[in-house]
Amino acid sequence: MRTYFSILPLLYFLQLTSCSDEKTKKEKDVEKDYFSSTQTTDDANDFKNEMATGETDFLRSLSNHQIAWQKWNHRILEKAKNTQRPIFALLCSPLGSASRTVVDELNENRALRELISSQAVCTVIDSSVNPEIANLGYRLSNEEKRSAAFPMIIWFSHEGSPIASDPVGNISGSKLKVIVSNLANVIEDLWKKSSRYTVENSRSENEKRQLRIEPNTEELKQPITRNELFQKETRQLSSLYSFGDKNLDFIGGLIPSSSIELLAIGSHSASLPGDVREKSREAAKTMTRELTSGALKDHLTGSYFYARRTDDWTLPFFSKDLLSQAKIAATLMKVGNLLGNTQFTNQGLELLELLESEWLAKEISSKSPEGNADMPGAFLWDYRTLKKVLSPDELKVATIAFSLEPTGNIPLETDPLGDYYNLNSLRSKTSSQEVADKLQLSVEVVSMALTTIKSKLLTHRRNQIKTTSESTLTVKDLALVLRAQILRANHTGSSAHLDAAKTTANRILSNYWKPKKGLFRISANLTMIPARCQDAMVVGRSLNELYQATLDQYWLKSATAIVDHSIEQFGFSGEILAELAQEEQIVPLRQFSVSMIFGESTLGISDQTLSRLYALTRKEVYGGILDAHRRYIARQAEGRVIYHTDYISSCALGDSALVAVLQGDMSSQLGKQFIATLNAPKHLSFLTIRPESASPLLTPLTGLPSAKGTASVVLVRSGEALGQVSTIEELTELLDSIISGE
């Protein structure tokens, strides 16, 4: 039997009150009806479908529904109050077909349509527009000890507090009818018997939820430094790596890009002993190789799927989005540089080029298959299908190149129910040279054959399955693309690549940033959806990285303006930033994105942003937030093996940041070489870059040696000069001695 938060306490309350004779019948009637003292001022039957002006393609596609879907904004609370109804919300994700299937079925099934329309104010929430509601959905599912899934049904009171929820996921037909009708009937019964208690109980539960997620930033009895956190947590992360399984001890369902980056950073740090650095290096290298050769990668196009579902890379979720792929492109370039692996770097460069030509140029933010994403012959391949599509000689090459098996290559441990036991996922773990050696062919012949094979399979897949695309680009999408573009420009030294990064940065500032109004998650020219804190910090980080690559004060000024506005907007007395401004909350729940381990959190990204800006500006407010981050993470890390890899990466800068001060003519050839050397991830992960010249944005410098020659670099820590160099060779040697201790 399904259980729902708030319902069991309510039924218990009703049982008690029914046995009580202390109150008069009139008092009981008033207590049961929360709206007894008010009049119904709106008729829900007069509501019109509002999705024609929805923020995304997905929402706009619902504009022809018979259900009067209302937009998810503050006005929906007023509508619920005026109609004296609860809110029926379907929380959806544009990735995957399940959300589209369910919302269409609710509209097309007359019984379900009339059931929810007659009882509630109905709305659809797109998680790409309101990610904080997706985070709420995760919390609600976790409270019920159930897995989160999209779409998810959430019933809200007119105050915006959740009454009940159910993660529907990929369910349709009679099962969906049972779930929706049962929950709707329970809510109707509760609402009629005691709307007052239903509202007040949901409010109380939400207040308790707020207390559970409030950050604890109290100082530990024995404070721990950022250096100590970096050493402790990176060592423990490396210890989780399993050589046999080639992953971090079965972290199923995640793409641990931030963990791979941290391990690669740890492989260079003098703070760690040699054995830890070596294991970190091996773990980062092997996991990146698994990432690029396994089934998470679409080997027919070179792009990457959205997420993996299981303990290895075998069964990914077969949707793609720009944001995840931009993150992977940046990770590949960064890790490739840190490990000195040109293959990883080149794969990151190729992926970024694909994203620019096939995604940005065509305004695509996500792609999802319609219907069954695991359709044989589309993403998972039946060997009989392969035999029909490919010639016998091509099949021989494909079998070796993609590790195919006539009976299927998906391991039993990742498919315990046997749903895919006779199917194949494409994995490219064998090089063209190895294929050539096994078949006694030349590498050229094998390469040509693979090109033909990929083309045939891709054509077959396109004929077998339809996809749905979303064109709405969020500011975070573009900020992550910008970060990858900056890494590429630093790697290649190409002015054209740097210009591409500047173009993306200008697009962000012109379309998503309005100095008097703030940053917007979706282009302010289209709709007024304010940015979330993570959006602002990702943008601030990328713009600051562009400043460090160019030393153009405009980018630093833009970064600090956006970050300062976000602190004013999202800050509170504890100095950890909330995800959403209080005036923008529809659900009365102040959320803090602080719980991610292998992924990215607002706390971790904001620390990466603020730590560098603090080293440059020494703004007191930045230092206060950084100190609160350390106190919070130190307390959390007390009882956990590994916590917050994106934050720990920031701790590589140390308690007092290493600052590279550029002197002389930075437009000279030597100056440009200095900038390129310092911006390489193997160095930039441990330092911050600034010019010597005075600026209102930068903290003043004193006691530095005079510039040498055309250009020179001084490394400074805690106000003390650690050395001055005037050649690239000297700079590399000094950096290696300070960063790696070599």
Image (cartoon, rainbow, N blue to C red):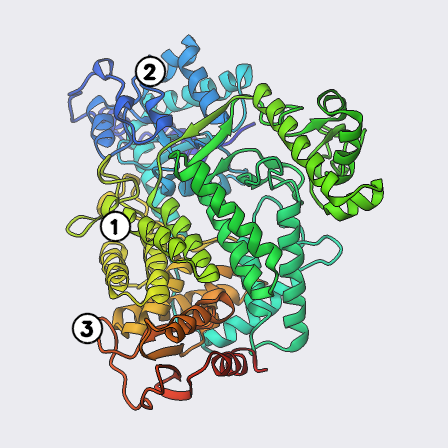
Q: CA distance from mark 1 to mark 2?
A: 38 Å
Name the residue at 38% across, 77% down: 659
Q: Give percent across and percent down for residue 639.
A: 55, 64
Q: Disc 1 marks which amino acid?
A: Leu
The quadrant of the picture occupied by the N terminus is: top right
Q: Give percent across and percent down for residue 231.
A: 55, 73
Q: CA distance from mark 3 to mark 1?
A: 21 Å
Q: Give percent across and percent down for residue 247.
A: 67, 54
Q: Quadrant of residue 585?
A: top left
Label annotation for residue 67: 2
The residue indicated by pointer 1 is: 509
Query: Which secondary structure lies at badge 2?
Result: loop
Name the residue at 60% across, 38% down: 298
Q: Quadrant of residue 219?
A: bottom left
The residue indicated by pointer 3 is: 696
Answer with mark 2 or mark 3, whichever residue precedes in sequence: 2
Q: Give percent across and percent down for residue 355.
A: 46, 42
Q: Nearer the viewer, residue 637 or 188?
A: 637
> Which residue is at the far top?
110
Q: Disc 2 marks which amino acid?
A: Ile
